[in-house]
Amino acid sequence: MSAVLDVKDLQVSFHTRNGVVRAVDRVSLKVGAGQTTGIVGESGSGKSVTCYSLLGLIPQPPGRIEGGTAMFGGLDLLKLSEKELQKVRGSRISMIFQDPMTSLNPYLKIGTQLVEPLRLHEGLDKATAWKRGIAALEEVGIPEPAIRMEQYPHEFSGGMRQRVMIAMALITRPELLIADEPTTALDVTIQQQVLDLIKDLQKRLGIAVVFITHDLAVVHEVCDVVNVMYAGRLVESASAADLFAHPRHAYTRALMRSIPALQKKGEPLYTIPGLPPDLSHLPSGCAFRPRQTPDRQALCLTDRQPPLQEIAPGHWVQACPGCVEGGLPL
Amino acid sequence: MSTAVIPATLAPVIRPGRSLWQDAWARLRKNHLAVACGLVLIAVVLICFIGPRLSPWNPEVTNLALKASPPGTMETLADGSMAKHWFGTDTLGRDLLTRIMRGGQVSLMVGLVATSVALLIGVAYGATAGYLGGRTDAVMMRFVDVLYALPFMIFVILLTTMFGKSMLLMYMAIGAVEWLTMSRIVRAQVQGLARQEFVEAARSLGLSTAVILFRHIIPNVLGPVIVYATLTVPAVMLLEAALSFLGLGVQPPDSSWGTLIDDGATNMETSPWLLIYPAAFFSITLFCLNFVGDGLRDALDVRGGKD
Amino acid sequence: MLRFTLNRLTQSIVVILVVFSITFFMIRLAPGDPFASPKAMPPDVRKVLVERYGLDKPLAVQYFTTMGSYLKGDLLPSMSYQGMWNSKIIKDAFPISLIIGLSALGVALGLGLPAGIIAAVRKNTWLDYGPMSLALIGICLPTFVMGPILIAIFGLKWRLFNVAGWFEKTDWVLPAVTMGLIYAAYIARMTRGGMLEVLNQDYIRTARAKGVPGWRVVLVHALRGGLLPVVAFLGPALAGIATGSFIIEKIFNLPGLGQHFVASVFNRDYSLILATVVLYAVLLVVVNFLTDLLVAWINPKVRLS
C-alpha cells in the first residue's frame, strides 16, 4: 500500500524557561491512502504536537523541530518554507479541531470562512466560490445551505459548526485530513453523527484521515491503523483489528481496560495509576515504568530507551521487557 | 504570532498550600519594575511629607531680590548661614523644591481622599446592584449608564465652583464622579460570585443578606478593587492637576503640582526649571502609580477593567 | 435597528434634560453671579442687568423660560459678553475646537492602531518593546506637560510652528499632536491587548490551518475582534478630547469653545455655561450612539435592540 504521508523520526521540542520539553521524540508513522490512521494517547502525549508540527502550526519559538522527515507527495513538509507550507495547508492537507465553538471566527460570515480556501488556493471568484460553498454545506447535511452561508457562527449549534468545519476542510478536496479530537467537545448523540459523517465522506472522497483522539472506543470504530503514543514516543502501532485483539504494550492494555463500556457493570472504573511524566525531566529508559505494577517495574529498561520492534507482521511495539505482554521474541 | 498547541506539561505547576495573597505577593515581588516603582512612590511620599520640615525655606515667604533664580542659587538665611535653592526659585523668589514638596502633599492627598470616596460609593453601589440582581440591578446600572454619558469633567468643574473654598469638598467632588467604573467592576464580580455554590450554601444556612455580603462576597472582590483603586489614584491626581492648571482647582497661596506646572508653563521660556521639576515629579509619580497598579493586576490575576 | 434608534433617542433626550437641569441649578448654587466681578458695579446698573436677564424672577420661572427658549432653538444671549448671542459665540469658537479634536483623533488612531497591531504581531521583540515603552511614557505625560515640551522643541527651538494663537494654517498641528500623542498611547496599548487576546484564539489557528497568509490572518481574521475594545474606547476618548480642549486651548491660547467655557465658569456667565454644556452633552450622546452602531457592525453577536 502506498503511503500518503510518511513521517520518520520526527523530533519536536519546546524550549522553555523550565528546560527543554521533548514533546515528540523520534516518532515515525505512515498514513496509507484511503485509510484512517489513529493516534491515541493521553493529553500531553504529543499526539497533537506531532500533527501540528507537520503543518508548521506550532509556535516557533518556543517550539522547534529538531529532526526527522515527513514525506508528502514528494515534498518533505519539515523542510518547506512558511510560504510553501501555506500552499499545502487547507489545500492538500486540511485540519479540523476539537472545539467547534471556538474554531470558527465569530466576526465573519460562515460563507466567507467556508470559501476562503477556495479563494486562496484555487483563485475562484466570489460567486463561483459561494456556489461551491453552498454545495459543500449540503454535502455535510446542513439544511437550507444558501441561507446558512449568510449567517454567523453564533447562530449555529456545536454539531452544526463541526459540520461546517468539516465542509471547510474538505472543500478543496485535500489528499489528507487531520482530525484533532473532532468529537471530544460534542454531545454524545452528536458525536456519533459527526463520526458517521467523517467516515461517510472519507469513503466517498477516498481521502486519507489522521484521527487524533484519546478515546479508544472512537478509534475502534473509525480507524484502520492505530498508533499509541505515550510521553512523546510511539509505544505501539498496529492495524486496528490486530491491536484490539492482541494489545501488547502495558500502556495500550491499560488504556483498553479503562474504556467504561468494556468493563463489567458494578465494578469500579479502572484508571491508570499515576500521571504522565514531566516531559522536561523524562526518566532514562522506559517512560511508562513509574506507572507499572511493582513486579513489572523491576523488568523495565532503565538504562536506555526501548526501541520499536516488529513482533508480528505490521505490529510494532516498544520493546521494553517489563511492558510487553507475553515477553519479547528474541 | 503564537497559535496552536503547547503540551499540557508546560502549564504552570500547581503549588499547594499557599493562599491567594501569598501567591500574589510572591508574584509581585518577582516584578522588579513594579517593586522599584513602589519604592519610588514611598520615597516621593516621604520627601513630600517630611521634606518641608527639614527644608530651611518657608515656601510662602517671597524674596523678590531672588525671583526666578536658577537651580543652585545660594541665599543667606536669617541666622546668617548660607543655604542652597536646589531647584531654584519661582517668580516670587520662593524655594521651588519646598513648594514642590508642599504641592505634592496636596496632590497626593487629593489622590487618597478622592479615591477613598470613589471606593466607598463604588463598592457599596456595585455590590448592592450585583447582589440584588433583577430589576433593582437593571435600574441601578441604567443610572450608571446615564451618568457615564454625562461630560463628567464639566461636572467636576461645576462642582469645584460650588465647593471652591473648601479643598476637602473639592477632593470629594472629584471622588464623586470617579466611582462609576469602580461600581461596574464590583457589580460584575459580585454577580459572578452570587451565583456560586458557597454563597448558596451560606444562604441555605439562613445567613442574612448583609452578613453574606460583608463576610463572603466583599472579601472576594477585594483583588479587583485594590487594583482598580491603585489605578484610580493617578486618574484623580491627573484630574486635580488639570483643574488646578486651569485655575479652577487649588487656589493661591496653596499650591499643588498642577498649579506649579501651570506657573512653569507660563514662564517656560525664561525659567525652564519652573516647569521641568514639578512636571518631572508629577509624571514620575503617575508613572509609578500606573506601574504598581499594573503589577498588582498581574499579581492578583485580575482581568481588564473594561466591560 | 429602528427600535434601538428610538430607544437611544429617548435615552439621549433624558440625558440631555438631566445635563440641562443639573447645570442650570448647579451654577446658580455656586457662590457669585454674572455681575459680581471683577469691578464693583453701580447698584442701579446691576439692577438693570439682573432684570434684563430675568435673574430676579423665581428659579422655577427662570428654569422653564430657559427651557422654552432652548426648545425653540434659541440659546439666549451671553451674560458676560454684553450684546453677544451664545449661538454666535459657539459658531465662531466651535469649529476651532472641532478641527483640533478631530485631527487629534486622527493622530491618535493613525499612530496608535499600527503601533498596537505591530507590537502584538511581533510580541516580545523590539518592535513591541519600543512603541510600548513610548506609549507608557505618553500615558504618564499629561497634556499640560506634553504641550509645553512640544512648544519648547518645535516652537521655540526649531521655530517650525507658532508657539500659540490661531492665525496661520499650521496652527492646528501642535495642539492636535499634543492631544493625539496621549490618546495614541492609550489606543496603542488597547490595540495590542485586544490583538494579543484574539491572536491566541482557536479560530486564528483554524485560519492558519487553511493556509491563510500571515498578513491576511492579522488583517482579516484578527483585526475585527482585536479592535472591539478600541472601538468601545472611542466614545470615552472623544469625550476626553472634547473636555481636553479646555487645557489644550489654554496652553496654545486658542479662541476655541473650551476657552470660552472655562472663562464663562470664572465669570459665572450662566447662559453661556448652559449653552456650552448642553452642546457638549449633545455631542457626547451622538458620539456614543455612533460607537454603538460601529460595535454592532463589527460584532455580529451584538443585537441592536
Image (cartoon, coloured by chain):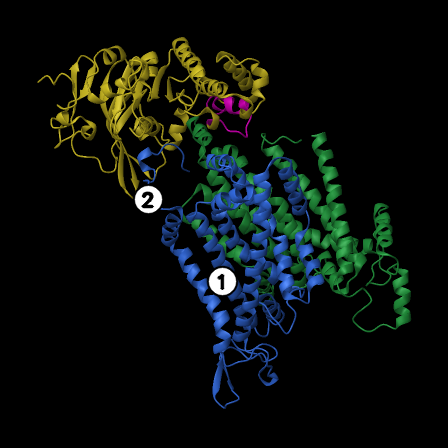
Chain colours: A yellow, B blue, C green
Measuring from the top left, give residue B254's x and y in whole percent.
62, 72
Classify A255 as above or below C3.
Answer: above
What residue is rendered at 50% in x and 24% in y? A116
Residue closest to the eye, A56 or C281: C281
Q: Is residue C73 left or right of residue B161?
A: right
Measuring from the top left, give residue C111's x and y in whole percent.
55, 48
Please report whichever mark, 2 or 1, sits nearer to the chain's N-terminal start: 2
Residue sticking out furthest to the front: B206
Q: Is residue C197 left or right of residue C24?
A: left
Q: Amino acid at mark 1?
A: Ile
Which residue has dot 1 on it?
B284
Q: Residues within 10 Å of mark 2 (few under 14, many from 20)?
A: few
Classify C7 as above or below B128.
Answer: above
Q: Is residue A9 left or right of residue C28?
A: left
Measuring from the top left, give residue B305's x and y in whole percent.
53, 45
Q: Is residue B219 left or right of residue C82?
A: left
Which residue has dot 2 on it?
B17
Q: Secondary structure at mark 2?
A: loop
Q: Amino acid at mark 2?
A: Gly
The chain under label 1 reads B
Q: Which quarter shows the C terminus of chain C?
A: top right
Residue closest to the eye, C163 or A106: A106
Using the numbered discs, state the Cα–Cα distance from disc 2 to disc 1 in whole angstroms. Answer: 38 Å
**Disc on res. C272:** none
The chain under label 2 reads B
Answer with the quarter of the image where residue A1 lies: top left
User: Magenta region: which residues?
Assistant: A103-122
User: Closer to the camera: disc 2 or disc 1?
Assistant: 2
Residue C210 magenta: no
What residue is rendered at 65% in x and 31% in y? C304
